[in-house]
Amino acid sequence: MDTGMVVSMWSGASLEEIANVAPYGLRWLHITPLSDRNLMKRILKRAERAGYRGVFVTLDRPVAPKSLNQSRLFKLWRRFPIV
């Protein structure tokens, strides 16, 4: 099916895995700025090689929670790999 998809750089599946299971759809990467510019370039190159045709940039970032309960959820969330 030819549908569009925006894939976050924080996705639990890699860019390549998503491209393999949805080879015909339009794929765009959603990326947030990182202090490590080389890592950003590598992620963008991987997206390009996997057939992603656009980039959405979000200028905000996830921040560490302040409460203990939120802190537990944040630690769980951080275990997911960066694409």
Image (cartoon, grey):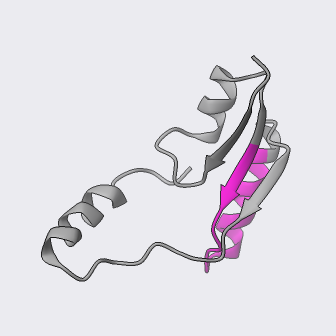
Q: Nearest the camera: 37 or 63? A: 63
Q: Residue at x 24, y 61 (%)?
A: 73
Q: Residue at x 18, y 65 (%)?
A: 72
| Residue 49 location, quadrant | top right
Q: Is-magenta flag for residue 3?
A: no
Q: State which region is magenta.
A: 28-47
User: Residue furthest toward the top?
Assistant: 1
**From the viewer's perspective, is residue 68 above or below residue 22?**
below
Q: Residue at x 41, y 78 (%)?
A: 63
Count of marks placed on residues: 0
User: Residue furthest toward the right?
Assistant: 53
Residue 24 percent coordinates (x, y):
79, 21
Q: Nearest the camera: 30 or 78? A: 30
Residue 47 percent coordinates (x, y):
75, 46
Q: Is-magenta flag for residue 39?
A: yes
| Residue 65 location, quadrant | bottom left
Side of 14 relative to 67 (left or right): right
Q: Residue at x 53, y 75 (%)?
A: 61
Residue 66 percent coordinates (x, y):
24, 83
| Quarter the N terminus occupies | top right
Residue 75 percent coordinates (x, y):
26, 63
Q: Nearest the camera: 5 or 14? A: 5
**From the viewer's perspective, is residue 41 above or below residue 47?**
below
